[in-house]
Image (spheres, grey):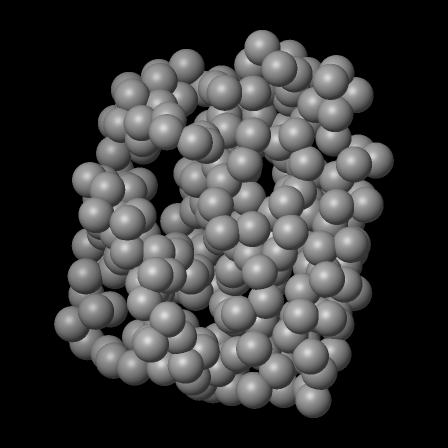
Amino acid sequence: MRYIVLIFVICSFAIKALWISLASKGTERSKLLSQNAHNHAKKVIKFFNVSLKMGGEFPKGSFLAAANHLSYIDVIMLAALYPSTYISYTRIERIFFVGGMARLGGTLFLERENKHKMHQDIEKIAAMLASGNSVTIFPEGRCTNGDTVIDFHGAYIQAAVAAGIPVVPICITYKSVNGETICLSNRDFLFIYGKTPFGPHIIRLIRRLRSVEIEVQVFPPIDAAAGDRKAIALAAHTDVLGYYTANSPLLAKL
């Protein structure tokens, strides 16, 4: 019965997303898809008994969120907190189920290796921000094992500079899973990094996840108007790294 509920939520999300894709286009489609993802993500985190503790608040209007990245759960959890278009890479798009769900959620897939398209991609993200649609990036460029927060890349932060939209640093800290404090022995149940295969990881998580406690710290917006993307990336990274280092139970176990 429990999994029937999850299947129903996923089907409802997919059907609504397909309808939106057919009935709208452009930035309006992106807004509607992100809102649909927001509505259904709240149901998914309730299904998995995700406890969210949030500090700070999101600014009014659109913003570019820059968060650390540990798991695909990050996306579902953040989507439950606010509507947003997510930026990912084409290699994720090719992953069965994960890529499909991300597309239905309005994720914008970019070719990180294609430097010639970088300018066009930045313009596309800037247009979304200027139209009132918030965008979320994970500027570490990949999921990590939680030992630290690696340096933030500033390329896509240029979109916020071009649009004159604030950048909001976000720190994601996993506190516990299935009632146990996050540590070296259980972090791989949630975190996905390196060459961990998506399929077995997702199946194991769906079957065994009973509860997870996550803390999300939202920092004050960084004014990106006429700013320098590298300086903004450094400031955002400093905020996130400092908070994560002081609050991650995983680091206390290292």
Quadrant in the picture for the N terminus: top left
Q: Quadrant of residue 144?
A: top right
Pick the quarter of the image with the C terminus.
top right
Residue at horizontal 50 percent and vertical 26 percent from the top: 190
Residue at image location 49% in from the left, 51% down from the top: 141
Is residue 17 depicted above or below 12 in this figure?
below
Image quadrant assignment for residue 204: top left
Farthest residue toward the left? Answer: 22
Q: Could you tell me residue 206's position as x and y percent?
A: 36, 23
The answer to whether residue 251 is left or right of residue 145 is: right
Q: Residue at x 70, y 23 (%)?
A: 250
Residue 158 in view of the camera: yes
Picture coordinates of residue 48, whole percent (x, y): 47, 28
Viewer-closest of 37 and 175:
175
Q: Residue at x 69, y 89 (%)?
A: 226
Q: Is residue 81 above or below residue 148?
A: below
- Depicted 169 relative to depicted 61: above or below: above
Q: Is residue 12 visible?
A: no
Would residue 5 appear left or right of 151 to someone viewing this image?
A: left
With 93 as the anchor, is 139 left or right in this view? right
| x, y percent for residue 18 | 19, 61
Q: Is residue 202 left or right of residue 168?
A: left
